[in-house]
Image (tube, coloured by chain):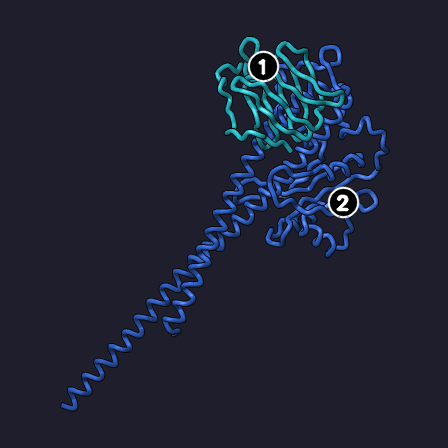
Amino acid sequence: MRHPTDIERDKKSISTLVELTGVFEGIASMRIAQIKNQVLQATEFFNDLWGIYSQLRVDSLFRFGRSQSGEEVLSKDLYILITAEGGFSGDIDQKLIKAMQKSYNKDKHDIIVIGHHGAMQLAQRGISFKKYFKLPSKDKNINVAPIIRYVQQYQKTTVFYQQYISLMVQDVKQIELSAAVQQQGEDSEEKDKKEIITADNTIFEPSMYNVIDHLERSMLQIAMSQLILDSKLAQYASRFRAMTASHERAEESQGDLRLEYNRAKRAIKDQRLKEIINGMRKSKAAA
Amino acid sequence: MAKKEDIKPQQQDSNIDKKSKDEKLPTPDEGMMWVRVYSPYQSYFNDQASSISAVNETGPFDILPKHHKFLTLLAACELVINAKDGEEKIKISRGIMYVKEDRVTVFLDV
């Protein structure tokens, strides 16, 4: 049996681990609450913009804000993968890449990857990508303009991302970006009151088409930011789950060590008691 | 990104009861407009005002009550809002302004 002082040392380090995992669990849960709040705020903002855009639309086509640019659109499709920055994301990034590989054809698709972990995973699989972006560490004012500039060059963009379903469940999803914008808009649309905004009843500056392009770019940016936030939410939830499991394991170990420590102490006491009784017996026999 | 010169606590809809079901912003008092300035993650102003000044591609302009429906892309400038309790200045880098029926919505950081 180990000596109680050794067990005491282990007990101390385990209790530090229990505290640390508890703190990380708390941080992850706090970040989850913050991001959920931001997603709600941004959704309200998006809905208001969509309200204007849907009244402005001259037809149902979403033009990715490029109707006035005159630039040629690439015939390839763009895949955007939103993955974790570090390696502590469990196996969800592998699942994401597997989901992408089901439809990936290097002659028909270009890939942009967000997050270092995803870039590493793609490189390990020998899949080349056009551009890598770091996953933003901050959760507010994410600048997605450089990504949207790529999006505007392609006829179609599909985003593969991690979706937060609940604290215990995160899933891999894919969505076409223009559909993501329209889906968000349709969720907010109040179909009974539709007023058309035209040049006849509204003053536009600089012009109606410039405003439409700008609105489309803005909504793409918000939709893209929302997908990034959704992925981050899933990553925090995954981390929270891992920390909860570690916390429980550490608490179990702490309980086991406490038991072992008490047994060891009791064993020492018993040993001493035996020695005392034996000593007394011997001294009695000698008398 | 928008920066507020005079830091004040985020204002809530004080006239929330005035909001009708069909309107996003509450109905302003006579001779006033309801102005809301916000970005995806922050609200900068949400109250009544008698005027709002900004700059677009054409140049500086003012919006007063009874203005015609107006939709414009804003340039980097300082929004000046004449609110009930004084002048509010908000520095912006870009935005969209929508004016309709004495309600002004300014979307920032878009």
x 15%, y 86%: residue:
A284
Q: For mark 2, name the chain.
A: A
**Residue that protrudes farthest toward the bottom in the picture:** A286
Please give the residue where the numbered disc 2 appears in the rendered image.
A111
Which chain's colour is cyan? Answer: B
Which chain's colour is blue? Answer: A
x 52%, y 46%: residue:
A28
x 67%, y 16%: residue:
B62
Location of the N terminus of chain B (image quadrant):
top right
Q: Position of residue A79 (x, y in %)?
A: 74, 42
**Residue nearer the viewer, B36 or A71:** B36
Q: For mark 1, name the chain.
A: B
Amino acid at pointer 2: Ile
x 60%, y 20%: residue:
B81
Label 1 element class: strand
Label annotation for residue B50: 1
Amino acid at pointer 1: Ser
**Residue nearer the viewer, B89 or A204:** B89
